[in-house]
Structures are given as structure tokens and as C-alpha cells.
């Protein structure tokens, strides 16, 4: 899985030696199907993804856990950016040339490459969820689904 | 770590057999310090946490990754709810008695017990971040920090 990780480092970028062992494990609970088959084709952020519709294919093992999710118009999707390297602390933007800390960025490159995306839930058929607002690579592993709750998820609550 | 996991199951709850192996690993990158030392004392959600201030203690290994984060008033905190069982698909509320799917709930109990919380960043001193809005147990392991970006994180973007 790490064969496709990009090992380039740009001038000004800083890496760290990661710990020898993991502290916890993740189950991949499904697969995200998007229109973008190569990293170069992915939108830079969900806004650039426009109206593109993606499909979240949940592992049927977890089907019953969807009960009641269709009551929500927006959901929070956690997924694992499995092509991203994990050891960069400071990253230099290809576009602006600016150096910034990994935790000040939404880059996939981070110690735990988990993305959190708010998406519009268009419908659920069986274990397939149609959503609008994802910008990730086709085949990205799913980690979690949660209802989006304005009262707790909006900073102006 | 799993010694303290609650094994009770309520009538109407449905569990699954989880996969034998994990698909990916997480590094715990720090520790969250909150006023709540026992699970029974934790607020039920960030709103009930009120104005309580918590401290995120980042592992110094990742210090440089904070560069630029202080420009943001709100940040997204991912953390690992290490006391939660992971095998329930349908959960029954202790309060309402309602049965709902795990993915329709913000319960810590889920296949990958990762929480995503939007918090107010009050200040950073070294590798300690003072924040308002967390509702987790003292000692909870940190997984990620990201800037909150209204344009991508608000469903009304």
C-alpha cells in the first residue's frame, strides 16, 4: 500500500522520524467511488469538486449501522488518504511557495492521514450512499460516517 | 487498553463480528487534558461542556507542524475514544430508549472510535494548545489537528 507514496521533498520542507509502532488500528469500512482516478485529477478542495456526485460503498457487514442516517441532509465522512506520506511537519505549497506547518494545512500529508468532509447526502440505496461534496481519489477507504449536527459542528453554535 | 471497555449490551442493540485484522495504523500524537476524569462526569456533547477550557498537549516530536495554526480562531480536533467498544451497529439510548444505527449517532461506540470536534483556539504556548469546546475524557489520545475552514467545513458554503 505504501508503494505509491510520494517520496519527494521540496526545499524548506521538514520531516520527522515517525514512531516505530502504531498506537491503535483502523478498520476500512467501505470504499469511496469518485470521478477522479489519478491524484493529479483531484480537485484541490471540495469547492472545486463542484456538483460532482460520489458514491460511498459501505461494507455490507455494517449495513444495520445506517439505520436512521437518511434523516440527515448533511453528513460527516471520515476517510483514510492511503497514498499520503506521514512524516512531513512543514510543507511548502507547490502553488504559493509558502511554508506552513502540517496542522495549519488540510493537506493529505499528516501523521494520521484522515480527512473529515461535510457532504450533502442525496440518498441511500442498500449500502450505497450518493453524496455531493467529496474531492478524494476514487478507491479511497472509508473510516466513519456521522450525522452533521449544526449545533455542535458549527463554530457559531 | 481494552480492559476498561464496557461490555454491556442493552435490549435491542445489535453487534457485529469485527474483522480479524486492522487495515491501517494510527499514531497517538498527543494527549487531551480536560476537567472530566470519569466517563460518567463527561458532558453529553460540546454544548453541555459550556465554557470549560481544555489543554491539548502535543507530543514535542510534532512541534514544528503547529507553525501557522495560531492564525485560526477555530480548529478541528480529531481524537481517539480509546475506552469505546467498536462492535455495535445499532445502539439504544439510555435516555430515550430509541434504537438507532451507529452511523446516525455521535456516540463514541463505532467501528473506528474517532471523534471530530470543532473547538475555539484560545492560545498556543510551545506544544500546549488552550481550547474551548471539547467534551472528552481527561487523557484522551490526540489523532490530528486541522484548521477549520468555513468555506469547506460549513454545509452552507
Image (cartoon, coloured by chain):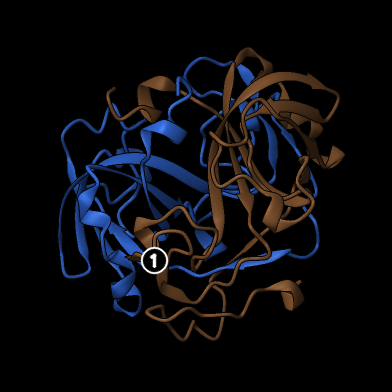
Chain colours: A blue, B brown
Asked if residue A113 is positioned above or below residue B119 in the image, the reply reads below
For numbered disc 1, what is the local secondary structure?
A: loop
> Where is the C terminus of chain B found, in terms of image quarters?
top left
Mark 1 closeness class: few <14, some 14–19, many ≥20 residues within 10 Å: few
Q: Which residue position is annotated with label 1?
A: B97
Of residue A24 and residue B23, the one placed in the foreground of this image is A24
Snapshot quadrant of residue A50: top left
Place of residue A55 in the rendered image (x, y in percent of width and height, measured from the top left): 21, 56
Place of residue B72 in the rendered image (x, y in percent of width and height, measured from the top left): 59, 17
Snapshot quadrant of residue A101: top right
Of residue A142 and residue A34, the one placed in the foreground of this image is A142
Count how many numbered circles sit on residues in the image: 1
Output the chain of dot 1.
Answer: B
Tell me, yes or no, if residue A2 can be seen here: yes
Of residue B55 and residue B44, the one placed in the foreground of this image is B44
Instruction: Specify whether B85 is left or right of A72.
Output: right
Residue at x 29% of width, y 73% of height:
A63
Asked if residue A42 is positioned above or below residue B84 in the image, the reply reads above
Amino acid at each position: 500500500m505504501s508503494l505509491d507514496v510520494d517520496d519527494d521533498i521540496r526545499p524548506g520542507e521538514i520531516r520527522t522520524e515517525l514512531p516505530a509502532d502504531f498506537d491503535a488500528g483502523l478498520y476500512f469500512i467501505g470504499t469511496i467511488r469518485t470521478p477522479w482516478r489519478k491524484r493529479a485529477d483531484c480537485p484541490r478542495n471540495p469547492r472545486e469538486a463542484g456538483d460532482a456526485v460520489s458514491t460511498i460503498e459501505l461494507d455490507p457487514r455494517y449495513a444495520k449501522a445506517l439505520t436512521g442516517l437518511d434523516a440527515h441532509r448533511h453528513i460527516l465522512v471520515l476517510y483514510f488518504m492511503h497514498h499520503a506520506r506521514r512524516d512531513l511537519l512543514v510543507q511548502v505549497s507547490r502553488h504559493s511557495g509558502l511554508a506552513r506547518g502540517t496542522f495549519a494545512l488540510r493537506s493529505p500529508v499528516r501523521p494520521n492521514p484522515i480527512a473529515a468532509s461535510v457532504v450533502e447526502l442525496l440518498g441511500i440505496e442498500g449500502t450505497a450512499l450518493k453524496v455531493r461534496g467529496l474531492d478524494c481519489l476514487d478507491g479511497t477507504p472509508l473510516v466513519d460516517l456521522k450525522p452533521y449536527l449544526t449545533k455542535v459542528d458549527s463554530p457559531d453554535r
